[in-house]
Amino acid sequence: MPTLPRIRTALAVAGVLALAAGLTACSSATASGEACDQSAPRNLGVVAGSTANAPTTALPASATSQLKAVGASNGSVTVVIPSGTPQVMGTTLIGSTAQDAIVCQNEQRTKLTQITQYIDGLKAANAQVDFLGAIDQAARNLGKNPMGVLVVGSGLQTTDPLDFAGSGLLSADPAQVVADLTSRNLLPTDLKGVTVYWSGMGDTAGDQQPLTIPARSNLEAIWTAVVKAAGGTLSLLPEPASGGATTGLPAVTPVPVEAVATKTDWSHPVVIRDSELRFTKDTATFADPAAAQQTLASLVPAIEQNGQVVTITGTASKDQATSNTADLALSQRRAEAVKTALVGLGVPAAELTTAGVGHDWCGWRAETDASGAYSDAVAAQNRTVVLTSAGVGLCA
């Protein structure tokens, strides 16, 4: 691959850095100097790079964990920037070929730090965005037992055959999108049995208008259907991307966002983030009632279109609490507040029911790291309101 030196050079000049947390890569290796296991490397494709329509690329912890697992297996990473013409940056080993266990582990730590910094620094060099083509390129060197493909970005492609900047695609039926791609033989060919881990889908910046909740939900449904049709599985990573876009990047056509998307996929939960409702801390009162009402108004037609009772479930952060009693009550009150707002917007009360689970639910994420340090950024991801249709679980 002619672009391979680009990664190697970038990693070489990154310097020798080590992470505080050690990798458990060498399952059979000990300090006695045994070589670490290189018999089952797992490779990862990475699609990442800052573009003009999304927050500057910054790998969250859940994405870094995929890279860490690759290094632990002594595997390789193929990096592609999702420009309008995808930029294949090459393939590099982020594990080790050392025959000594301690050297092996040190190399793994160093390379993990270097590849993370390298990916965070990538920028698009071509106008527009092409995730589909970039995923296809990134999946070509995965081998027999792949780790998967990691994608970082908004998911708002602006080139054919998935040009969301074109009329109506953001609210299109996912099945119709898949049928069109299939009929034109445009699905990626190397995703069979592969998990696509996606970070930041639907998160926008720059000139791109923020997505409504139904628009984000349908964008996720379209990509879920596309990846499934190609033989893979889409796994959305939990941390939202935030912040502004990197300045001076090639232009990306803004995707029009209708006031209300025409279709919501009720076979999956519809998650309303804490940042979208903005409850005052430890209360069920909206900090900005007008903004919350605008957010919830976008869901009214989707609830009506569903035609079934929708359950509104409040979830909470643990915030180092020793009991779930208070969080159960708070999350229930927040669900009731959302119901009251939706009824005020015209949804019949009989079509809505509420529940509160506090911090005891399937989607809760640990708010402290291995050292016991608390992260409010992670805790904020546990503060949600989740809408589900009959028979659909909170983490479906």
Image (tube, rainbow, N blue to C red):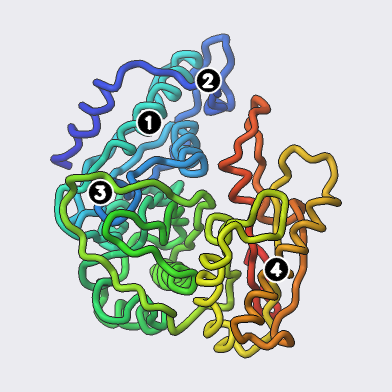
Which structural element holds mark 2? Answer: loop
Decide which of tag 2 and tag 1 comes sooner along the chain: 2
Decide which of tag 3 and tag 2 comes sooner along the chain: 2
Name the amino acid, label 4. Ala
In space, the residues marked 3 and 2 are separated at their CA atoms by: 29 Å
Q: Residue placed at 46% from the left, 46% from the top?
A: 147
Q: Can you tell which quarter of the image residue 300 is in?
A: bottom right
- Residue 369, horizontal then vertical, whole percent: 63, 32
- Residue 303, horizontal then vertical, whole percent: 59, 83
> Can residue 248 be seen by looking at this rendering?
yes
Q: Nearer the viewer, residue 391 or 239?
A: 239
Name the amino acid, label 1. Ile
Q: Nearer the viewer, mark 4 or mark 1?
A: 4
Q: Residue placed at 56% from the left, 42% from the top?
A: 377
Q: Which mark is residue 94?
A: 1
Name the amino acid, label 3. Ile
